[in-house]
Image (tube, rainbow, N blue to C red):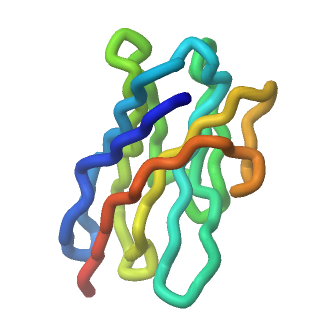
Amino acid sequence: QVQLVESGGGLVQAGGSLRLSCAASGRTFSIFAMGWFRQAPGKEREFVAAIRWNSGSTTYADSAKGRFTMSRDNAKNTVYLQMDSLHPEDTAVYFCAARRDYGLGVTVDEYRYWGQGTQVTVSS
């Protein structure tokens, strides 16, 4: 099993920045990739970014490209999501997820382990 705990959410004004963290514990050696997803009220959970655990290669949703940066610290078993130039439409609960299979998953079904989520609210 892998346990994931997110932190770093909060309230920020439009144009501001936040950095989310996700600490992994348990059978972390089994992780191939980790991802960030978000879910706004009344909407489905959507992909934001993913990173390959070993190489650090990344992929982003179009909405995140140029504004969000995902990184990892293998020594700390932690991934980060640096979010800049935030918009009110970025308001959502942000979830960290981990997968064991090969590839950078971009859908909810491709991830086995999930954190509880952290709220991000961007005011206009």
Residue 2, placed above or below residue 19: above
**Outermost residue toward the right in this view:** 102
Q: Residue at x 20, y 64 (%)?
A: 10
Residue 33 % position (x, y)? 64, 29
Toward the viewer: 66 or 5?
A: 5
Residue shown at 57% from the left, 12% from the top: 29
In terms of image quadrants, where is residue 3? top left
Instruction: Determine whether 61 is above or below 53 in the image.
Output: below
Residue sitting farthest toward the front: 1
Of the pair 61 and 76, the residue shown nearer to us: 76
Instruction: Name the residue at 28% across, 75% down.
Output: 121
Is residue 57 among what the camera can see?
Answer: no
Q: Is residue 32 visible?
A: yes
Nearest the viewer among 20 and 26 is 26
Q: Position of residue 110 (x, y in %)?
A: 76, 46
99, 122: nearer the viewer: 99
Q: Taking 35 as reference, is 115 left or right?
A: left
Q: Which quarter of the rendered picture does the N terminus lie within?
A: top right
Q: Position of residue 49 (x, y in %)?
A: 58, 47
- Quarter that holds the C terminus: bottom left
Q: To which quarter of the image does residue 86 belong?
A: bottom left
Indicate left or right for 66 with 81 as reference.
right
Residue 30: image x %, image y %? 63, 17
